[in-house]
Image (cartoon, rainbow, N blue to C red):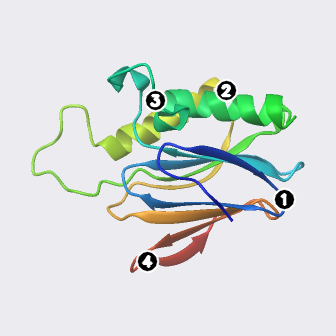
Amino acid sequence: MIHVGLSEIKCAESPETLKTMGLGSCVGVILFSEKERSAGMAHVMLPDSSLARSDHFPPGKFANTAVPEMVRLLTREHGLSPGSLRAKIAGGAEMFKSYRPLPMGSIGKRNVAAVKKQLEIFHIPIVAEETGADYGRTIEFFTETCSLMIRAIYKGERII
């Protein structure tokens, strides 16, 4: 089991499993190749690195740096074909309901939109997702089967 912490990116090959916990408004992004049975996972906290207070931050922290870095790692260091990459995403919840709409929208929705924008830029199709709602998630990606297990308190387990 390879644990992916907040703002981290990690890669794995079959039969390894990638896991991240505590996805509230954060988004878990998995890029994988079914043919190669290899994958990368990022625990994305925020939509855009322009929000950074300094130039020094982990590339997994922001959607606009996490997706490009995962593509680089999987294609250059792990030898995957860019055309073989597929995505699964989970998270982006609105953990705390606001009584008035936020001017820029909830951070969870913004994170999901930013991840989708980056995947579109790299022409990576999203083959499964579970995003939004008002509850946190823990996810595990099994490289052997390319399945994503999602666990949530009071919601049970689902595989996408």
> On screen, 139 above or below 4?
below
State which quadrant residue 132 falls in: bottom left
Residue drawn at x 15%, y 51% as measured from the top left: 98
Question: Residue 112 placed where, x, y %?
Answer: 45, 42
Give the label, 1 or 2, closer to the camera: 1
Q: Nearer the viewer, residue 158 or 58?
A: 58
Upstream in sequence: badge 1 or badge 2: 1
Residue at image mark 4:
155
User: Along the line of sight, which residue is nearer the eye, 89 or 21?
Assistant: 21
For the residues marked 2 and 3, what is the alpha-carbon distance in whole angstroms? Answer: 22 Å
Q: Position of residue 88 (x, y in %)?
A: 63, 51
Residue at numbered disc 2: 122
Q: Is residue 6 left or right of residue 36?
A: left
Q: Is residue 15 left or right of residue 29?
A: right
Comes first in the chain, label 2 or label 3: 3
Which of the 4 image quadrants contains residue 97? bottom left
- The local secondary structure at tag 4 comes to loop
Q: Amino acid at mark 3?
A: Phe
